[in-house]
Image (cartoon, rainbow, N blue to C red):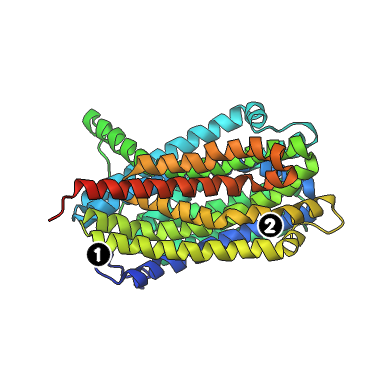
């Protein structure tokens, strides 16, 4: 039978080739996800209008939270399992992976049930009211099945890559994205289903991705097969302990997604306060584009993670540092290129979502160059946080993620508009990223000096 799994040697292969063998399938899969997000915005913008974009943007923090929980468990399980694999303890790695899937299913079911039982409370917390309430409620109710599906798909992609099958993980991104794109068009235009159709397309695409992950784990996995867990009190206690450690290691991944949700929520409130509904609609375009850039930067971190974690567990520090240097270089290139696109091609980008006659078009075209100025710093921050997670320094990784995505960000949205006016709204995110990069640089200098002091000269 044909085996499409890749032959990956985390401990001995050339770092550049090893990184490329994971990065390009991961990036390609994420690019298709990006294509889905863009097409979703294009179809909604042209088929429903600016209020449709605003409604989806208001619900987006829920998707960020779900994806963040999946990333938290995925990163945590991948780091812990990679360390076990480096020591030849395959059974422990399988147990950790199985425990992560169990926790993911449990959390997503509870979260979905809460959102269905208390829709008014959730929408109120998201700041939904006025003319946007009814279209947002429609999208929200049809979107909720994605809760369970997205959690399992996100978690599964990390495990599949670590198992040596980045190409299968790539197709687990590509195929659901293609399904989503086709159904988005069909449901919004020929069928005229509006926001309900956009949400249903997302649900079906998520189902396809989840079924592909389930198929791999049940029939195609090589090393990280699911393991039958014991149900004794001692085993349950050990399971909770293991899940707790994986959560601690992967917590920055959750905080990173929460940070995106905070960016959307605090930005929505700030733009509504200073500009109004048209400002929220313009900001929604930036929020459509931000996850796309975030995905590319995350592709770098996720590609480096299994290499770093495996070699960290094996005690091969030169390979760890070599992987970090390589991923930082890639991050710099990506950050610069994306910033240049936002600087020179913002009107063209906005044109994909709205016509020039829309008042929102001018607001977005003027603001996006400011907004894109901080992507170099964001790429570096995500790369460093991923490195710290991979070597089990979750406290520092969590601190930097909280600073960039919550503390500095909320402060920037509160202060900059009063100082700089409308440009301050768009510069809040770049300012938060720049401040975080400065803090990381200071941290690295302090740690290096402490290392020199603790290591006496020979």
Name the residue located 74 percent from the left edge and 64 percent from the top edge. 348
Q: How far is disc 2 from disc 1 in space, using C-alphas?
A: 42 Å
Q: In the figure, is residue 438 to the left or right of 284?
A: left
In the image: residue 53, left or right of residue 437:
right
Quadrant in the rendering for residue 184? bottom right
Residue 66, x across and y down, in percent: 52, 42
Above or below for 27 versus 47: below
The answer, for residue 66, to whether it is visible in the render is no
**Residue, far right:** 357
Q: Which mark is residue 369?
A: 2
Where disc 1 sits, the SS reads: loop
Toward the left, the furthest residue is 458
Q: Earlier in the sequence, mark 2 or mark 1?
A: 1
Identify the residue shown where x is 23% and y is 31%. 232
Q: Position of residue 54 (x, y in %)?
A: 73, 44
Q: Is residue 322 visible?
A: yes
Pick the front one: 187 or 96: 96
Which of 3/242 is in front? 242
Badge number at residue 144: none
User: According to the image, label 1 marks what residue?
Assistant: 11
In the visual, does 41 lie left or right of 101?
A: right
């Amino acid at each position: 039978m044909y085996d499409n799994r890749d032959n990956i040697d985390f401990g001995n292969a050339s770092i550049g080739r090893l990184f490329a063998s994971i990065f390009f399938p991961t990036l390609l899969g994420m690019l298709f996800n990006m294509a889905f997000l863009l097409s979703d915005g294009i179809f909604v913008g042209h088929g429903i209008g600016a209020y449709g974009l605003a409604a989806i943007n208001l619900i987006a923090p829920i998707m960020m939270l779900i994806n963040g929980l999946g990333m938290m468990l995925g990163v945590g399980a991948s780091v812990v399992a990679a360390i076990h694999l480096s020591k030849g303890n395959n059974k422990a790695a399988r147990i950790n992976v199985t425990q992560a899937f169990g926790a993911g299913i449990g959390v997503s079911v509870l979260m979905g049930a809460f959102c269905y039982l208390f829709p008014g409370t959730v929408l109120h917390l998201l700041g939904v009211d006025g003319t946007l309430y009814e279209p947002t409620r429609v999208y929200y109710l049809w979107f909720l099945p994605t809760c369970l599906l997205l959690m399992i798909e996100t978690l599964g992609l990390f495990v599949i890559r670590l198992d040596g099958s980045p190409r299968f993980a790539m197709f687990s991104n590509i195929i659901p994205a293609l399904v989503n794109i086709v159904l988005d068009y069909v449901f919004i235009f020929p069928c005229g289903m509006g926001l309900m159709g956009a949400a249903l397309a997302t649900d079906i695409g998520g189902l396809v991705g989840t079924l592909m992950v389930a198929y791999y784990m049940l029939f195609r996995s090589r090393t990280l097969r699911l393991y039958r867990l014991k149900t004794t009190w001692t085993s349950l206690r050990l399971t909770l302990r293991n899940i707790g450690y994986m959560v601690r290691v992967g917590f920055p991944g959750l905080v990173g997604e929460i940070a995106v949700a905070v960016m959307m929520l605090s930005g929505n409130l700030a733009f509504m306060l200073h500009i109004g509904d048209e400002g929220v609609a313009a900001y929604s375009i930036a929020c459509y584009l931000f996850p796309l850039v975030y995905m590319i930067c995350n592709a770098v971190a996720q590609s480096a993670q299994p290499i770093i974690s495996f070699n960290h567990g094996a005690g091969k520090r030169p390979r760890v540092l070599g992987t970090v240097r390589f991923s930082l270089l890639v991050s710099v290139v990506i950050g610069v290129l994306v910033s240049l696109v936002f600087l020179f091609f913002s009107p063209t980008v906005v044109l994909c979502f709205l016509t020039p006659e829309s008042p929102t078009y001018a607001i977005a075209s003027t603001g996006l160059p400011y907004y894109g100025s901080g992507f170099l710093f964001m790429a570096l921050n995500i790369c460093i946080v991923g490195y710290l997670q991979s070597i089990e320094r979750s406290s520092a990784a969590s601190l930097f993620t909280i600073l960039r995505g919550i503390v500095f960000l909320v402060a920037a949205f509160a202060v900059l508009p009063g100082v700089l006016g409308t440009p301050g709204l768009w510069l809040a995110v770049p300012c938060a990223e720049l401040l975080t990069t400065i803090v990381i640089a200071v941290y690295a200098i302090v740690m290096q000096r402490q290392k020199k002091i603790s290591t006496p000269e020979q």
